[in-house]
Image (tube, rainbow, N blue to C red):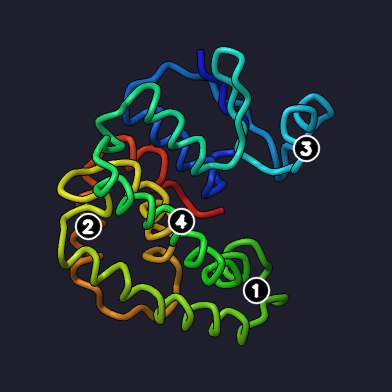
Amino acid sequence: MLTIWGRLNSHNVKKVAWLAAEIGLPHVRHDVGGQFGMDAAYLALNPNALIPTIEDDGVVLWESNAILRYLAARYAPDLWSLDPMVRAQGDKSMDWQFAFSSAQHRAFHGLIRTAPADRDLEAIRQSAAKCAELIPVLETTLGKQPWLSGDRFGIGDIPMGVYVHTWSSLPIDRPQMPNVAAWYERLKSRPSYADLVMIPLT
């Protein structure tokens, strides 16, 4: 059985937990990281001291997007197209997520994980502004196709699906993005997304 290590309030853990639930893959998840800490046994699995990590039939793997690709290839190939031209479009969105998550980092940590008296409001404002500069890239893509993976939902939608929920939930100024908003509504209709991604930000 698949084992997932990582606390669910982590963006990267949400990705993996969502996919496992989405495809009905039996698994167990152990809280690791943050307030739960990391013991020597975990660090032996992942020397980066990051989450998530998985173990699946003796295969130990870290890096959340690599885990998504592995799980899709093994258990749900319909979510990662065999057509290299289609697959590349989803992969592009998965990798582009790192630019957006980097931009969003200071707003998220400043507003969610920092006490109000200690917040750097200028850093939060700059972070929100950078997100506003980047999100039109997603808007353009979703104006051409219903999913970041192409004509149907796939793993290319998962990384940014997690981060767009945070972007939509933070108390920041956001430009109107109707294509992103429509895609977000489609994601919210997926039970696994609602249960595992749309949890309170902490």
**Identity of the residue furthest to the right in this view:** 40
**Residues at circles 2 and 4 in contact by the CB criterion of under 8 Å:** no
Kind of element beneath mark 2: helix
3 or 2: mark nearer the eye:
3
* Residue depicted at 27% across the width and 35% down the height: 82
Q: Earlier in the sequence, mark 1 or mark 2?
A: 1
Disc 1: which residue: 116
**SS under mark 1:** helix
Query: Circle 4: is it few (<14), some (14-19), or many (20+) Cα within 10 Å?
Result: some
Q: In 3D space, how far apart are the residues under numbered discs 1 and 3 (Cα atoms)?
A: 33 Å
Give yes or no for contact between labels 1 and 2 (Cβ–Cβ under 8 Å): no
- Between 134 and 163, which is closer to the camera in this rendering? 134
- Please give the name of the residue rendered at 18% of the width and 61% of the height, measured from the top-left corner: 182
Which residue is identified by label 3? Answer: 47
* Tag of residue 95: 4
Indicate the secondary structure of the residue bearing disc 4: helix
Give the amino acid type for the residue marked by disc 3 in the picture: Pro
Disc nearest the viewer among 1 and 3: 3
